[in-house]
Image (cartoon, grey):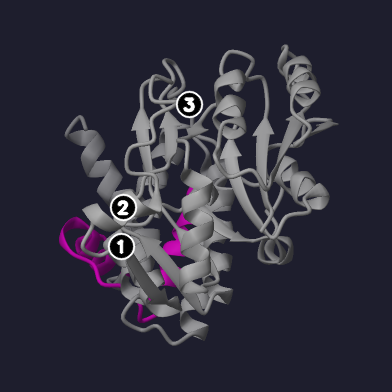
Amino acid sequence: MKVSVIVAIYNLEQYLDYCIESLTIQDYRQMEIILVDDGSTDRSPLLCDEWAKRDSRIKVVHKSNSGLSGARNVGLDVATGTYVLFVDGDDYLVNGAITTLVEIMKINKVDFVQFGYEEVQGYEGLNDTRNTRLEEMKRSLKTMFLVYDRKEMFRQLYVLGGVAASACTKFMRLETAHKLRFKEGILHEDEQFTTRLLAQADSVCYVNDFLPYKYVIRQGSIIHTAFKSKKLYDLSEMYEERLEILRAANFKEILPTTASAYWRMLILLFGESQKASDEAACSFIRTKVRQLLAGNDLQLLGVNRVIAYLYKWGMPGLDIYYGIRKLLGK
């Protein structure tokens, strides 16, 4: 079975060699590596072309910058494998990862495999094969595979929080990814993609303690940025789509947790909107909060319940709450 690995790249010249090397040394040989250069302005395009000359399995696509979703969709357009895996250009896979994922998919015959990731500081473990091969994992783990239906996977993701939403922790059929694709021009595209993936999956294999994907923490990669209203609008759209899917599936026991998470996000971003003096965003949040309160999905505790009661009593709960915080110097 051929595997397509799609790598979205934008200005990653310092890290790209490590990522691509981790793919070329995989012991699974039936694969194509699709490097999508998303309009990089550094040496990334040159590095991609050099790797393609060294390994015939590598395809390179150069395109104008459109963001992560656009780059992944272009990769899907040229992919020819049976299965697909997404890797970010500054991360890497441990050797044996793809062999194991293909074996898991064959054994369980599910719609996709959900696996874990590990945050690492660098690339020292690039050639580390510990706990990646299927045989070793069977010996070391009592419960190797957990096969869930759609409802249980939603519960794992949105109630228990034990499943990563990243598209890079999913191994699926290429035709599945083609049907879904990534919505372009939004933030948090992985969360939306995962919600839609779960909505159409009948069965999912969750691989316990399997961490083949290494997410590299780069110094200076986590930067505090000012409030942006686009983040608010995109997150709101994502949560409302998620709630609509859960209601349509009649997953009543999962709805309260998801609705309450949406509520907490709105409360948090209201404070950021006020600090940024973005009245349009504040007004948007007030409307969304009232809409949530009009439904029957919320289960609130503590200060969130107080805010809800203020609204029910006809008072602007959010404005009162943040007004008190300001008086207290918080």
Q: In which quadrant will I find the N terminus?
A: bottom right
Residue 298: quadrant of the picture? bottom left
Q: Quick check: 198 left or right of 119? A: right
Is 169 rendered above or below residue 53? below
Earlier sequence position, callout 3 versus callout 2: 2
Q: Are marks 1 and 2 in contact (CB under 8 Å)?
A: yes
Q: Main secondary structure of the magenta part?
A: helix
Spatial separation of the CA atoms under disc 3 and disc 2: 41 Å
Image location of residue 39, percent across then percent down: 78, 25
Is 228 rendered above or below residue 78? above
Secondary structure found at label 2:
helix
Q: Can you identify the residue that label 3 sits on?
A: 225
Q: Residue at x 38, y 25 (%)?
A: 125
Image location of residue 206, percent across then percent down: 38, 63
Secondary structure found at label 1:
loop
Earlier sequence position, callout 3 versus callout 1: 1
Q: Is residue 236 visible?
A: no
Amino acid type at mark 3: Thr
Q: Can you identify the residue that label 2 sits on?
A: 137
Q: Can you identify the residue that label 1 sits on?
A: 144
Q: Residue at x 39, y 70 (%)?
A: 153
Q: Which residues are magenta?
A: 282-311
Q: Residue at x 34, y 71 (%)?
A: 155
